[in-house]
Image (cartoon, rainbow, N blue to C red):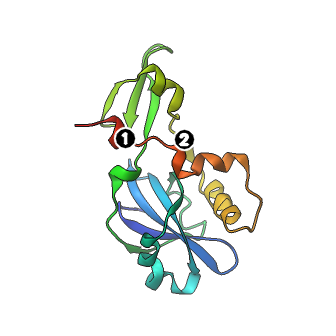
Amino acid sequence: MNLTQGDLFTIPVGDGTAYVAHVVGVLRKKDFFFVVYDFRTDDNSAEGDAEEALQHDVVLAGQTMSTLFVDMGWRVVGTAPVDADRWLPAYKVTIGDADSWFVVDFSEERRRPATAEEVDDLQFRTTRAPAGIAAAVRALAGKAPWEDRFDELLPADARRAATLFRD
């Protein structure tokens, strides 16, 4: 599945409804960063309702891969502009020796040495399997228990690249 920035897609809950999500950025054509809006719609009317989701808060955000997109029942239902600077995260990485920390943006195009605070605060890049994202969405809908591992998908957890790389 070739996704592009701005694609709106659904993640089914399993009861005939789905949450609407938004592709914020694509990396190497297979990984993408997304946000899920606090907007649940009927699977059958998702195409007509998708843009309404943009008026709602973001409740989940993360990186996953497009390889199982269709197999998971996810489907593109529209497209809309997205403020990538608002959502794309920055990550910490080591380059060379284990104590050589850097901050890198989602696209891996910008990199700079990390401060001690950033080493403590930033997350490593994590690509979550689509099944894990689907499980978090079911928990969000109250169809399954919330698990601690879903906390990393909460949008407040990520530091944004736009605030760490000011051109």
Q: At 37% across and 52% down in the image, what residue appears?
A: 86
Q: Secondary structure at mark 2?
A: loop
Vertical order, 123 against 23 (above or below): above
Q: At 52% across and 48% down in the image, what residue appears?
A: 156
Q: Total label count? A: 2
Q: Secondary structure at mark 1?
A: helix
Question: Where residue 145 sits: x, y (%)?
Answer: 77, 59
Earlier residue among tags 2 and 1: 2
Question: Where residue 142 sits: x, y (%)?
Answer: 73, 67
Quadrant of residue 109 within the rendered picture: top left
Residues 64 and 160: in front is: 160
* Quadrant (top left/top right/bottom left/bottom right) for the N terminus: bottom left
Q: Which residue is mark 1?
A: 161
CA neighbours of label 1 inside 10 A, class few (<14), some (14 to 19), many (20+): many
Q: Amino acid at mark 2?
A: Thr
* Quadrant (top left/top right/bottom left/bottom right) for the C terminus: top left
Question: Where residue 12 sits: x, y (%)?
Answer: 61, 72
**Residue 57 relative to residue 79: left or right:** right
Q: Which residue is mark 2?
A: 126
